Amino acid sequence: MPDALALLKTRRSVNLGDLIDPGPSAAEIETILTIATRVPDHGKLAPWRFIVFEGDARLQAGEKIASAFRADHPQAKPEFIDVERTRLAHAPLVIAVVSRAGPHVKIPEWEQVLSAGAAAMNLVVAAHALGYAAKWITEWYAYDRRVLDALGLASHERIVGFIHIGRPAQHPEDRARPALSELVTRYKA
């Protein structure tokens, strides 16, 4: 079996607590992001972009998340605020994939969104190919306009996912996958 197929067969999501240091180097991050851009992109629009959170920036962004949470839950206990503050601090590296999809005379917005999703998946696979593990998460703050504004997203931009990347603390177990017989039909005219 070609190495690429073996790689794809072994990709797993891992628990956030199992993503440990060290994270990718600057050169590895550049490789991951370069591979993330190698996706179908009708019209060459690049209808996505990336926000890299590493080091203290993870907690600085977490403060924005915690602030929105506090506004909605003024009676929240400090430990719940801390959970929100550390949302992006569980892995050494977090990369937000941002959809910039919008109206276009020729390219449907849906295709642009799918391209952003493909960029997120390529990012996950590239991290795996470099020996890291990743977890693609959205959660409430990916949809909260106050948080998106605080993270610098334009009004038409949306979060496709926050990709948390680190070394796997342990070999991730596989989960049961659906049988192809439940997912695949063959068209018959």
Image (spheres, helix red, strand yellow):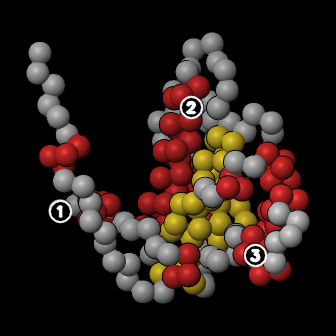
- Classify 156 as above or below 68: above
Check whether the beta carbons of the residues at disc 1 and disc 2 lie within 8 A of each other.
no
Task: Pinpoint residue 70: horizontal percent, then vertical percent.
Answer: 86, 65
Label placed on residue 1: 1
Q: Residue at x 11, y 15 (%)?
A: 189
Q: What is the CA distance from the residue labelled 1 to the residue labelled 3? A: 47 Å
Residue indicated by mark 2: 112
The mark that comes first in sequence, 1 or 2, is 1
Q: Residue at x 79, y 45 (%)?
A: 145
Label placed on residue 24: none
Q: Is residue 12 left or right of residue 134?
A: left
User: How many numbered circles does the render carry?
Assistant: 3
Depth-wise, is mark 1 or mark 2 nearer the camera?
2
Q: Label 1: how many residues lie within 10 Å, few (<14), some (14-19) or many (20+)?
A: few
Q: What is the CA distance from the residue labelled 2 to the residue labelled 3? A: 36 Å
Pick the residue in front: 70 or 91. Answer: 70
Residue type (three-letter) at the residue carrying disc 3: Phe
Depth-wise, is mark 2 or mark 3 nearer the camera?
3
Quarter of the image containing the N terminus?
Answer: bottom left
- The answer to which image quadrant residue 125 occupies is bottom left
Residue indicated by mark 3: 80
Q: Is residue 100 left or right of residue 181?
A: right
Helix, strand or loop at label 1? It is loop
Helix, strand or loop at label 3? It is helix
